[in-house]
Image (tube, rainbow, N blue to C red):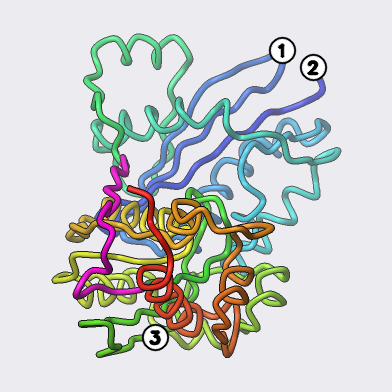
Amino acid sequence: MNDKITLAMDLFQEDRLVSMAFYCNVHGIKEGYMFIQMGSELPENAIWKGLLAVLTRLASQYCNRTILMAFSPIYLQLGDGRTKDHVLRILHSFKASQHISFFEYQGNLDKVNKLGLEDNHPINVLRGYTISEYETRLIGFKSNKKKKFEVSPIYYEGVFMPATGACLDLEATSTVIQYARVIEYGVVKFTDGQITDKLQSFVNPNMKIPKAVRELTGITQRDVDRAPRSYDAIKALVYYLKDCRYLIGHNILYDFSLIDTFCQRFRLPRLNVELICTKRLAKKSNLIVKDYRMETLLKLYDIHNERPHRALPDATANFYLMKKMFTESFLVS
């Protein structure tokens, strides 16, 4: 391991202010943490400026080593431009580079970020913390006992279909909440069993859409590049749902968690809703099916989805699925 460098990194954003925390271990020589405050820089630009500041220092002395990068490869898909090109050239100057698991470093990076924010360092100035300094500071550092982005879902347990509500579906870049970026949402509002309104929007995730997602959804890079950015799009969605009491979807916990985490991160009003998951309803109804996938349930009830894996068609089909399940299936209380 003495010919390697471990570099872990995470990106943080709160109230549109971006910061980054790093862990660096030049094996056999030195080890520590770093923090940099990026101000109101766009995340897709900030990540490359932060990496440039760190990698420039490392490459000047240790380019004969292999660099182990402990952060999600999805970060390398963000943004474009000269700074990104410069960073990629520096990475290629090392003996070799490879990705390793990020999760063992995540908790400490979150604490380093909190320490850096508390110290209120100047913008774009890289601040280092030795291991001993970091551990000493943690003793007196008052961290929140409650997780910052704790999601506490409440499920609707009634046996009758609610009089009003909204069916929501999101298309996103990942199934993992931490890394997922919304690229499209679709909402169907209903009253007394009838659709009353619909809303659809693409969302600009400030990154390239993974090929697998493009192929599954048919959503193109051009679709999202012309769309509202995440903050504005999700803010509009939250406002649209502000009076909604019941939120319905297939695996709705994922959609709700993604929106709720975003609301907490950007201090938007959180949705005060009860969740109805059509997958849970299917299990509760003791349906005899091979699986509880949405397409299986739609086929069972002879419901047509005009365009699967697109937000508004999925939300619309899920409304009719929920309606069928409440009116034609026996829900075990």
Mark 2 element type: loop
Q: Amino acid at mark 3?
A: Gln
- The tag on residue 28 is 1
Residue 310 placement: quadrant? bottom right
Circle nearer the N terminus (2, 1): 2
Q: Which residue is mark 2?
A: 2
Percent coordinates x, y for residue 74 in the rendering: 63, 55
Q: Amino acid at mark 2?
A: Asn
In this image, 103 relative to 6: left or right? left
Name the chief secondary structure element in magenta: loop
- The tag on residue 195 is none
Residue 114 placement: quadrant? top left
How many marks the image carries: the answer is 3
Percent coordinates x, y for residue 172 in the rendering: 53, 66
Residue range highlighted in magenta: 149-167
Q: Nearer the viewer, residue 62 or 267?
A: 267
Residue 80 seen in the figure:
no
